[in-house]
């Protein structure tokens, strides 16, 4: 009993000492808001775990109620109320700040938008995931930046020109017209992300000379994506296989396509997939994750795009004999990283093929299911002793043709083994 009392007294004394040292939390709220306003959004969110006081500073929303006539909700007048509210929110002093917009479209329909802004000219709009699950109506988004004149009505009060990052989450069919209208005013937007838009079927993005990054994640009903953005450098997509059309994307250098969810309800068209890969011929970094690419010997040879780096993740089924006879050398491929192959035979066949076709390959690594990374080196059978001189852990596996073997040398904290990838 005495021990427990002493422990409680020590804990109380420790809390008192912490309070005495915490001179920041005792400052007036206006000063605390000013401190938070200088923090990036992610860092400001982390402060919310310090105490209930900091949590209230970051996550206490301002409520704005807007009533819009359902018959006029597609008109400019109907959207103007939303523009004014978000524009005032963007221009407000506090950063980060949370605003809750309740847009009454009718007696039955209400659009709820949680808007969060950060100090780095970023805006996050969450359109209520619960409402999205309840309706689940399909819709399309046509996002286009419209060049505005200095006398444009909205430019006087919107403040949208300062925005650099826009994150749209759980967009519903109720926002099918409001979101494009908002987007059209973001003249200097550099980064756009769409996430968990369940009912979204078609996405058409036409951006000006500033959009550099586009990310689309977890939109399970997506069927078509059309993208035209001359300044775009990075494009990431995670979800089911849609039809993707890339137009006017000459500056695109980094593409990640994660289609491990399969084709969903869409029709699979091999020609469309090959056309997409051909459109990516000038990118420097290509990440393909979790889908099947089968080469049919009856089709025309496929010209290899000029990739500089190539990430490959599970489940590519390849007829290597056909590839060897029809594919051209990979003259620009420098780095290969392979992750998650389930079958060693398929992995070794692809390794053998890439080592022969990639004429300037500098590095090939394979990551196992236990997240161990290994550098791959190919040796003739007569040079087995060379592998044993390498300090990191190593494994030797006979090649599919049994004319050589692959040395897998584990990466360590000091870097890779000094040996580089070699080819016959």
Image: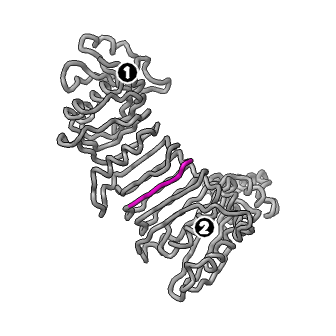
Q: Is residue 154 left or right of residue 299?
A: right
Q: Quadrant of residue 312?
A: top left
Above-or-below relation of 303 to 168: above
Looking at the picture, tell me which residue is in the foreground, 185 or 69: 185
Reading the image, the residue beneath label 2 is 182
Disc 1 or disc 2, which is closer to the eye? 2
- Region in magenta: 224-231
Residue at 58% across, 79% down: 75
Residue 303, x across and y down, in percent: 32, 36
Which one is in front, 207 or 368?
Answer: 207
**Residue 359 locus on image (x, y percent):** 36, 23
Q: Is residue 94 magenta?
A: no
Place of residue 189 in the rendered image (x, y in percent of width and height, measured from the top left): 62, 55
Q: Quadrant of the C terminus?
A: top left
Displayed quadrant of residue 162: bottom right
The residue carrying pointer 2 sits among few (fewer than 14), some (14 to 19) or many (20 or more) residues within 10 Å by Cα, namely many
Relative vertical location of residue 307 with respect to residue 24 in this rendering, above or below: above
Colour scheme of this structure image? one colour
State left or right for residue 84 relative to residue 327: right
Of the numbered discs 1 and 2, the one sitting upstream in the chain is: 2
Q: Is residue 228 magenta?
A: yes
Q: Tell me the SS state at disc 1.
A: loop
In 3D space, how far apart are the residues under numbered discs 1 and 2 (Cα atoms)? 51 Å
Magenta segment, principal secondary structure?
A: strand
What residue is pinned by disc 1? 421
- What is the quadrant of the N terminus in the image? bottom right
Where is residue 375 drawn, in percent x and y? 38, 26
Of the pair 401 and 74, the residue shown nearer to us: 74
Label 2 sits on a secondary structure element that is helix
């Amino acid at each position: 009993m005495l021990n427990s009392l002493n422990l409680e007294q020590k804990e109380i004394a420790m809390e008192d000492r912490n309070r005495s040292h915490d001179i920041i939390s005792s400052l007036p709220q206006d000063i605390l808001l000013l401190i938070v306003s200088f923090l990036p959004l992610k860092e400001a969110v982390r402060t919310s775990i310090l105490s209930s006081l900091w949590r209230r500073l970051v996550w206490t929303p301002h409520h704005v109620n807007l009533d819009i006539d359902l018959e006029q909700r597609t008109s400019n007048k109907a959207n103007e109320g939303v523009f004014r509210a978000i524009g005032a929110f963007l221009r407000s002093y506090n950063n980060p700040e949370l605003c809750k917009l309740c847009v009454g479209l009718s007696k039955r329909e209400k659009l709820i938008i949680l808007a969060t802004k950060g100090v780095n000219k970023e805006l996050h709009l969450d359109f209520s995931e619960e409402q999205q699950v309840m309706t689940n109506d399909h819709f399309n988004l046509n996002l286009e930046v419209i060049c505005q004149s200095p006398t444009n009505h909205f430019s006087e009060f919107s403040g949208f020109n300062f925005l650099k990052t826009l994150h749209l989450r759980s967009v519903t069919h109720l926002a099918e017209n409001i979101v494009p209208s908002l987007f059209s005013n973001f003249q200097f937007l550099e980064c756009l992300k769409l996430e968990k838009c369940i009912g979204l079927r078609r996405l058409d993005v036409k951006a000006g000379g500033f959009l550099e990054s586009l990310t689309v994640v977890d939109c399970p009903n997506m069927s078509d994506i059309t993208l035209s953005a001359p300044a775009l450098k990075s494009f990431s997509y995670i979800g089911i296989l849609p039809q993707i059309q890339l137009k006017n994307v000459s500056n695109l250098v980094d593409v990640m396509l994660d289609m491990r969810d399969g084709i969903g309800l869409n029709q699979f068209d091999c020609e469309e997939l090959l056309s997409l890969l051909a459109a990516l011929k000038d990118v420097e970094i290509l990440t393909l994750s979790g889908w099947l690419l089968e080469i049919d010997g009856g089709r025309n040879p496929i010209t290899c795009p000029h990739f500089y780096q190539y990430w490959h993740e599970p489940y590519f089924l390849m007829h290597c004999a056909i590839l060897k006879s029809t594919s051209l050398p990979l003259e620009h491929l420098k780095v290969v990283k392979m992750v998650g192959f389930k079958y060693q035979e398929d992995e070794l066949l692809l390794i053998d093929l890439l080592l022969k076709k990639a004429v300037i390959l500098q590095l090939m690594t394979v990551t196992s299911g236990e997240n161990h990374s290994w550098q791959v080196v190919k040796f003739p059978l007569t040079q087995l002793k060379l592998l044993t001189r390498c300090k990191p852990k190593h494994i030797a596996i006979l090649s599919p043709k049994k004319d050589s073997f692959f040395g897998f040398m584990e990466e360590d904290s000091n870097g890779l083994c000094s040996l580089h990838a070699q080819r016959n």
